[in-house]
Amino acid sequence: MVIDQKTVFVLGAGSSKPLGFPLARELKEKVQRNLTNPRRLSELAEAISPGSRPGLFEGAATRLAQGLQRSDSPSVDAFLETHEQGERYLNLSKAAIAQALLPFEVQDDLIGTSDWYGDFFGRLLAESGLDGFESNEIAFVTFNYDRSLEQYLYETLLHASGSLGTTIASKIREIPIMHMYGNLGPLPWQSTTGAVRYGVGRPAPKVIAQAASSLQLIGDRTRPGQFDQARELIQEAAFVFFLGFGYDRQNLDRLKPERLFSTVFRGTAYAEPPGRQLDIQRTFQDTFDSHPVHFLAGSTAMPADQVSRTDCKTFVGQLALSALVR
């Protein structure tokens, strides 16, 4: 099987959850706890300003932690966006996110994973082979900071083929993987400078600083071209699959292309009650119906029977692959 119809996967935090990564609210809570932990705060201070005293950041850390705790914002990002002084906390927030998230990148968790990574890419590799792997018309638009997707692909292709790492890296570069809000830094096989190794465990201040420099939070997003490219991918796609995505209105607006033709949209809404599922439906339709969109068989943008309450593994195995395989 080679996927010859342009297909875009839009990934939210739920798509990485099976590998142990936190959801947005869980990450917010982890950041909040670290900000009030003297040892963690000392590491953050050293990462932001080497040689500085932790007390220099104590006041800001306390205020940020209290704000995160008392607000109903679903994420650190959302809190900064609505807070009138959010930009003052950018550097501290980026470092705190990197500090909290890096320990969740565990190399052993990628080996032999039985979740959707393994099901989807295992089948692609088995049927298209290494030589034809990059010929698959797939692209990934991810709102996640973690680099598990890239590292999984690299490790899997490397060990399945026995090819040189440089050969595998070049094949992966042919597959668009776009982190809309940055990531935890380039992996060693992606860059010889500024690389952050996958699976560092508890990160040292220098590693925190390096990873934080690649994150983009509200007010710090200087690469609007990322969304231009994502919209172009979606506009040209035959299929767009949302996996573990929260259907945030703002993110949907940013993904909205100028026009759509016969694109088929499908997505997960794992563990969401029927009322929330209807809310997702309305939000999605309100966003995309503002364009002259024509959908297959006159259907709405995301028919109820195509917003699956299954997990990502089941969705990919039963719905996504069945739509792509002809």
Image (spheres, grey):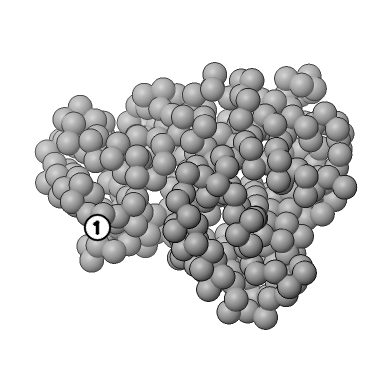
Percent coordinates x, y for residue 252 in the rendering = 52, 64
Q: Which residue is mark 1?
A: 88
At 46% across and 29% down in the image, what residue appears?
20
Residue 325 point in image, percent of width and height: 83, 45
Residue drawn 87% across the image and 47% down it: 326
Specify the quadrant that holds the N terminus: top right
Indicate the position of residue 230 as horizontal and vertical percent values: 62, 60
What amino acid type is highlighted by mark number 1? Arg
Quadrant of res 294: bottom right
Whether residue 300 is visible, yes or no, is: yes
Q: Is residue 194 visible?
A: no
> Residue at left 34%, top 57%?
78
Q: Position of residue 34 (x, y in %)?
A: 24, 34
User: Badge 1: how crowded within 10 Å, few (<14), some, or many (20+)?
Assistant: some
Q: Is residue 218 left or right of residue 296?
A: left
Image side of residue 322 versus residue 213, left or right: right
Between 185 and 76, the one nearer to me in the picture = 76
User: Please, what secondary structure does the residue beneath circle 1 have?
Assistant: helix
Vertical relation: 311 (above or below) 165: below
Asked whether 246 or 274 is in front, the reply is: 274
What residue is at 41 percent from the left and 37 percent from the top?
Answer: 22
Above or below, 146 against 166 in this view is: below
